[in-house]
Each structure stands twice: as structure tokens, then as C-alpha cells.
């Protein structure tokens, strides 16, 4: 048997006739990364666990028979093995070359191979475990005392049992390619290295499947928004591999490097406010504790993502310094934030960013997937993609609030008001139910439309984005459900007092109260101003909940005071509506003199939603059907449903327009002004994969 193992080992090691000059350099960079990740305290802890190892190479506190999909217990065995391998191989470690540790490493890896633990989640079997084995092999090889030949062959063969990267997409393809890189380095196999590197960098391409989209959003698990979650895995992995290979013949191509930078700086970084990320881009990970806190991106160690990006893209030093300051909180979240507005037509997602605030919106269409539940995670996220709003100034407004959330009152969402929380019936996501979902943008301002038909609630929801304000409209709100239908303005951690203006009288909200004629309400430097007096229910009270209720794999409780405000459309509404202006960054004392009358409601019906910001001279309109709109002396008429924005009505008009469904190749817009008379503007619409993107035209 040993003779057979020796022959197989020789065949592994002889696949490359001569050592390649780049291989030792790449290996040294990976080892440096592994050494840097393992602190002295971690190594000391590994030695304590080393003492608890049983004679057969196992640990009593690990259930090796477990097949759990998440938090899989057997993987802790390989985590400990890797720390031991670092302690054994790290040149300045007091445990370097220790033969007792070496014997434990041998026993531990033999036990893993013999027991062959398996998870019900393929990711552990085909990605996590092979990566650990590859790192352990490289560490022991660097110590000049590799594992016994027969064990090397067995472990290499175990790595090869994992599915190859060729049929995978996005972050999963990259993760599998990474352990192929480890195997190529261990066996000094140039052919395998070339293939593994090609597969690792292949996801840095536009795709209409899983991965990086033409609008620079990131989708995984079919067409599900994953700018963080899998998107962050993609970013971290690609930049890491690019740093390993920098300056070698395997280095990342310049075009791909620019694409990677574009996704990081212009998409991912803009979902951050300070050190916290938008809950809408985490997928089912939103149900995990601390997941919104991205402070580790800016840690001072060499393995922090910002530091790795600096190696790959040194020309981005200034942008990285700004991000580092915001994430580490040595600068305010507003520091050097430029006004921008992006609509991701492939991802059904809106980013609206100003120095004073960020206001992001998550929607879903027939082209995209609703936020998923799976592996016991994200159990209550039934309505999270139905126009959900991430409205933040500091960034931590929703940090770890999820266990205490009332999940049918997600910020921005119109939904049924259930007596008890409802769990998702379909796991792993389902497609949206409507196709007129989209947005228009000129990169600074824009509008977003969401046609909602979910859980027996129909609505037309419009969001209109300016500098100091965001206008939120709902129309055609109809339902036959027995529950009340509500639209939630916000549900965030409470930060002090809540004030309202009811019938021109200002008062403080106490606990949980329903009001009938509110002009505005204010909380935490954000005002919600109603274009007509509205009936609003407001709560500013303690809420509590458990992580287990939203994620079976997590434990612990959360409790705290929560600000929650919602409009009650009552049961069985027919064509109900709402219209309010969100004004972030305004003090309670300044609000009475704030002039939100500059925003004129032109229409709020199920066929047309439109506003005119008279100070900015911008009209934004959502035409759910062909029709016309009068804005002062200006008339706008369209022949097909579309979303448009017109700037400078009395001068050189700029028209921005988008048609979300991709049904039409062309459309005509007719604009009539006293100065220019009637102009018919033909618009050639982008086609797939750019269907739904904005066209910008300047009209004399």
C-alpha cells in the first residue's frame, strides 16, 4: 500500500519537469498572509487545544458525525490543524519545528482523512475543507518537514474529490479555484496553476448569470442582489489572489483590474455609511449578528481588504485613505462623500448618496430574486425586497436591530400587518411578480418605481431623489387580505425624542400613539413631512427579540428602544395612497421654517406618479401607462410606459429616461414649452443586457 502511495506521490510531483521561478514567490506571499492572520494568542490557544487532542487525533468536543449545513462542527478540526501548522512552520514561533506538534499534525490529518466528515451543505465539502487542507499542506511543506508521503497523497486526492470550478460561477468558482492554486503550488504543477488562475480571474467579467453584472451590481444564487455577502467574498478573494500573483506571469490583466476597482469603489464602497453597510445587500446574512459592521475592512493588519487593494492598485491610495478614515471612524461618515445617484437596472437596487445621508432602496422584479431564506437563516424576511429603505446618517441605525424588528414593518415597505411574524414559505428565493420595476438617473438625481404584487398586496411605489429631500409616494394600494395594510416610514433604533406637528401644534410623542392629522414628524435629525395631513401610528418604545427566531443557527437576545412609524391603510383598501417627503439632516427647531413646499405633487395615481422640485427645476415622473403630464407651462407626453426626469424646464432641457421592461426598442417623448413650442424627441432605448438603463439627452 505504501509503495502505491509513493508512486502516486511521485506522479503528483513530476507533473512539472522543472521548478517555476514564480512559484516560490507566490508561495511566500501566501505563507506571509497565513502567518499574519495568526496572532500569538491564537497560537497559544491552539497549543492548549493541542494538549486536549485524543490519541487517535480527534477532539472530544467536536461532533464528527454532524452534517449541519451552517456552523458545521467538524470544520473546527481543520481550523485547529491550521493553527498548529502555523505554529509549527512560522519561523519566529517558539513552536517552530516542534516534533511533538508535528506528530499531532500527522495524527490529526490522518484522523480527518479516515473519518471523512461530510456536511449537508456542499460549500463545506467542496470549498471550505479543501481550502483548509491546501493551506495545511503548504504550511507543513514550508517547514521542511512535510507530512508523510502516503498522507500527502491521500490529502491531495481528497482535495481533488471536490467539484472542479468549471461549472460554477461568481464567488463559488473563485473559491474552488483558490484551493486548486494551493494544490498547484504544493505539487509545483504549472499546468494546474495556469488553469486555476484562469478560473480564479474568470468571474471578473460581465455576465447575465451569477456574478458581476453590466451595471456593476453583483448577483448570486441566480439573480439575487448580493453586493455584500457573495459580492464581498468575490472582492476579497479576487484582490487576495491578485496580490499573490502581482508581478508574476500569472498577474491580473489590467482590464480586469479596472473592472474590479470599479465594482469596489463605485458600488460596494457606496453601500457603506461609515463602517456599516446597507442591510439590503447582505442577502440572508442579514440575520447574522454583527454582519453590518465592516470595520475589519480597514484593520491595521496587512490582510485587511483595504491594505490588499493598496498592493493591487497603488494609484487608489487617496481613495483608500478616505475610506479607511470613514470606516475606522477617525473621520465622520460624511467625510469627502460626493453626491451621487445610481440605479442598478440588473439588480433592481438604488443608491442615493449625499454627504448628510444615504437613502438606498431594494426592489424586485420578474428579472430578479427576492431575498432568500435557507439553511435555517433569514426566516422572517418575507417583505424585505418590497421597496425596503436603508436610511442612514451615522450608519448604525439598523445595526443588530433585526431580532427586535417587527418584520412586516420593514422601513419603506407596504405590507399586511400580521398579528404574529410570518415565516418565508419558499426558501432559496423566488422571482418577483411584476416587470415594471426600474429607475432613471443622471448620476446625481433620479427616480425609482416599484410595481408591487405580493402576498395579496398591490401598490405602485415611487421614490424621487433630490439633494435635501427624498419624496416617497404610494398609489393604487389595494388588498383583499383580512389584515390592515400598512406603509412603514421607518423602524430603527431610537435616538432620543420624537416630535410631531399635528394641526400646527408641536408635541412630543410618548410610547405608542395613533395620530390623525400629522403635518410632519421628526426623529434623530430626520423629518417626515406629509404633502397632505396624514394618519400615522408612532411608537418609541422598547422592543426585544432573539436571534434564534430569525436564524436557527444563532443564539442570543437583543433589546432596545425602537422608533417605528407607519401609515395605516386599514383592511381591504382600494386605491389607497400616501405621499411624504423625507428630509434628513434637519434639527427639530429648524423644521418649522423648512420650506418643503418647494416640492409640488403633480400626480400620485396608479397610472402616474410625478413631482416637481421647483427650486432645482427638476420634474420626475413615473408613467405606468402612456399619458401626459402638465408641470406649470410645460407639457410632457409619452407613448409608452417609462420613467423620466427633465431638468431646467425653461432653458436647455436635459431629458433622462428609462424603460424598465425591455419591451420597446424606441419611444417618443413630446415636450411642449412656451419658449420652444412642441418638440418630439425620439429615443432609442438600450437593449439587453443594458435594457432598463438610462438614456440622457440634451434638448435645445
Image (cartoon, rainbow, N blue to C red):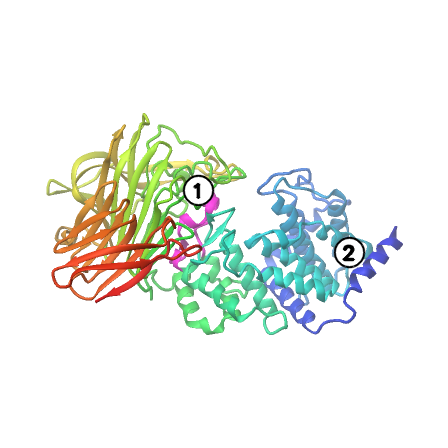
- Say above or below: 313 vs 448: below
Which residue is disc 1 drawn over?
370
Kindly tell me whether residue 154 is visible in this rendering. yes
Alpha carbons under labels 1 and 2: distance apart: 44 Å
User: SS for tag 1?
Assistant: loop
Kindly tell me whether residue 47 is visible in this rendering. no
Quadrant of the rendering where the C terminus is positioned = bottom left
The residue depicted at 64 percent of the width and 38 percent of the height is 67
The residue depicted at 66 percent of the width and 41 percent of the height is 61
**Chain part drawn in magenta:** 270-294
Q: Residue 361 vs residue 247: left or right?
A: left
Give the mark count. 2
Q: Is residue 489 magenta?
A: no
User: SS for tag 2?
Assistant: helix
Q: Are marks 1 and 2 in contact (CB under 8 Å)?
A: no
- Tag 1: Cα neighbours inside 10 Å, few (<14), some, or many (≥20)? many
The residue depicted at 43 percent of the width and 65 percent of the height is 324
- Say above or below: 65 vs 341: above
**Residue 440 point in image, percent of width and height:** 31, 55
| Front disc: 1 or 2 | 1
**Residue 476 point in image, percent of width and height:** 26, 37
**Residue 696 point in image, percent of width and height:** 30, 62
The residue depicted at 48 percent of the width and 60 percent of the height is 297
Q: In this orientation, which residue lies closer to the viewer: 212 or 392?
A: 212
Which residue is disc 2 drawn over?
152
Q: Is residue 284 magenta?
A: yes
* Residue at far top of view: 482
Q: Residue 461 vs residue 111: left or right?
A: left
- Say above or below: 39 vs 581: below
Q: In this orientation, which residue lies closer to the viewer: 185 or 477?
A: 477
Amino acid at each position: 500500500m505504501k509503495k502505491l502511495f509513493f508512486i502516486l506521490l511521485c506522479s503528483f510531483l513530476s507533473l512539472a519537469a522543472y521548478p517555476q521561478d514564480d512559484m516560490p514567490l507566490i508561495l511566500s506571499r501566501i505563507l506571509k498572509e497565513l502567518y499574519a492572520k495568526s496572532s500569538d494568542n491564537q497560537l497559544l490557544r491552539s497549543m492548549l487545544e493541542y494538549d486536549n487532542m485524543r490519541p487517535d487525533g480527534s477532539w472530544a468536543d467536536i461532533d464528527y458525525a454532524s452534517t449541519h449545513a451552517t456552523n458545521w462542527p467538524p470544520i473546527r478540526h481543520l481550523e485547529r490543524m491550521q493553527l498548529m501548522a502555523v505554529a509549527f512552520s512560522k519561523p519566529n514561533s517558539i513552536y517552530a519545528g516542534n516534533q511533538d506538534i508535528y506528530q499531532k499534525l500527522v495524527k490529526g490529518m490522518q484522523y480527518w482523512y479516515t473519518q471523512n466528515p461530510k456536511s449537508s451543505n456542499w460549500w463545506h465539502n467542496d470549498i471550505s475543507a479543501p481550502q483548509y487542507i491546501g493551506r495545511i499542506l503548504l504550511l507543513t511543506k514550508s517547514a521542511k518537514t512535510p507530512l508523510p508521503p502516503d498522507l500527502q497523497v491521500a490529502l491531495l486526492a481528497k482535495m481533488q474529490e471536490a467539484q472542479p470550478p468549471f461549472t460554477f460561477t461568481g464567488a463559488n468558482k473563485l473559491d474552488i479555484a483558490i484551493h486548486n492554486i494551493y494544490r498547484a503550488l504544493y505539487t509545483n504543477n504549472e499546468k494546474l496553476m495556469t488553469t486555476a488562475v484562469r478560473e480564479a480571474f474568470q468571474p471578473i467579467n460581465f455576465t447575465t448569470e451569477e456574478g458581476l453584472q453590466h451595471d456593476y451590481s453583483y448577483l448570486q444564487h441566480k439573480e439575487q442582489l448580493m453586493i455584500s455577502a457573495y459580492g464581498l467574498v468575490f472582492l476579497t478573494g479576487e484582490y487576495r489572489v491578485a496580490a499573490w500573483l502581482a508581478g508574476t506571469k500569472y498577474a491580473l490583466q489590467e482590464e480586469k483590474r479596472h473592472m474590479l476597482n470599479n465594482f469596489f469603489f463605485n458600488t460596494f464602497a457606496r453601500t457603506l455609511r461609515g463602517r456599516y453597510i446597507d442591510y439590503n445587500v447582505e442577502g440572508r446574512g442579514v440575520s447574522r449578528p454583527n454582519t453590518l459592521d465592516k470595520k475589519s475592512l480597514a484593520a491595521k493588519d496587512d490582510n485587511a481588504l483595504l491594505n490588499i487593494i493598496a498592493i493591487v492598485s497603488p494609484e487608489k491610495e487617496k481613495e483608500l485613505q478616505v475610506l479607511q478614515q470613514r470606516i475606522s471612524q477617525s473621520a465622520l461618515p460624511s467625510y469627502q462623500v460626493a453626491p451621487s445617484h445610481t440605479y442598478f437596472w440588473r439588480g433592481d437596487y438604488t443608491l442615493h448618496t449625499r454627504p448628510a445621508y444615504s437613502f438606498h432602496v431594494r426592489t424586485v422584479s420578474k428579472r430578479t430574486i427576492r431575498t432568500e431564506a435557507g439553511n435555517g437563516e433569514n426566516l422572517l424576511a418575507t417583505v424585505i425586497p418590497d421597496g425596503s429603505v436603508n436610511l442612514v446618517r451615522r450608519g448604525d441605525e439598523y445595526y443588530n436591530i433585526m431580532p427586535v424588528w417587527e418584520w412586516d414593518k420593514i422601513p419603506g415597505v407596504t405590507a399586511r400587518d400580521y398579528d404574529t411574524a410570518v415565516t418565508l414559505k419558499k426558501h432559496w428565493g423566488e422571482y418577483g411578480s411584476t416587470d415594471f420595476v426600474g429607475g432613471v438617473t443622471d448620476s446625481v438625481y433620479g427616480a425609482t418605481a416599484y410595481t408591487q404584487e405580493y402576498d395579496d398586496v398591490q401598490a405602485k411605489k415611487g421614490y424621487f431623489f433630490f439633494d435635501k429631500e427624498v419624496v416617497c409616494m404610494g398609489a393604487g394600494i389595494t388588498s383583499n387580505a383580512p389584515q390592515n395594510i400598512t406603509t412603514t416610514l421607518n423602524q430603527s433604533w431610537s435616538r432620543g425624542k420624537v416630535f410631531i406637528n399635528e394641526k400646527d401644534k408641536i408635541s412630543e410623542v410618548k410610547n405608542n400613539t395613533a395620530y390623525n392629522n400629522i403635518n410632519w414628524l421628526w426623529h434623530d435629525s430626520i423629518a417626515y413631512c406629509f404633502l397632505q395631513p396624514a394618519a400615522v401610528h408612532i411608537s418609541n418604545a422598547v422592543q426585544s427579540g432573539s436571534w434564534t427566531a430569525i436564524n436557527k443557527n444563532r443564539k442570543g437576545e437583543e433589546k432596545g428602544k425602537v422608533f417605528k412609524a407607519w401609515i395605516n391603510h386599514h383592511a381591504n383598501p382600494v386605491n389607497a395612497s400616501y405621499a411624504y417627503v423625507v428630509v434628513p439632516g434637519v434639527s427639530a427647531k429648524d423644521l418649522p421654517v423648512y420650506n418643503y413646499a418647494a416640492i409640488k405633487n403633480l400626480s400620485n395615481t396608479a397610472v402616474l406618479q410625478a413631482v416637481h422640485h421647483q427650486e432645482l427645476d427638476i420634474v420626475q415622473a413615473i408613467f405606468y401607462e402612456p399619458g401626459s403630464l402638465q408641470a406649470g407651462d410645460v407639457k410632457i407626453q409619452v407613448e409608452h410606459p417609462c420613467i423620466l426626469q427633465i431638468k431646467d424646464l425653461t432653458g436647455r432641457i436635459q431629458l433622462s429616461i428609462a424603460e424598465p421592461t425591455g419591451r420597446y426598442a424606441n419611444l417618443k417623448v413630446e415636450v411642449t414649452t412656451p419658449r420652444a413650442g412642441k418638440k418630439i424627441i425620439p429615443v432609442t432605448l438600450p437593449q439587453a443586457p443594458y435594457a432598463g438603463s438610462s438614456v440622457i439627452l440634451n434638448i435645445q
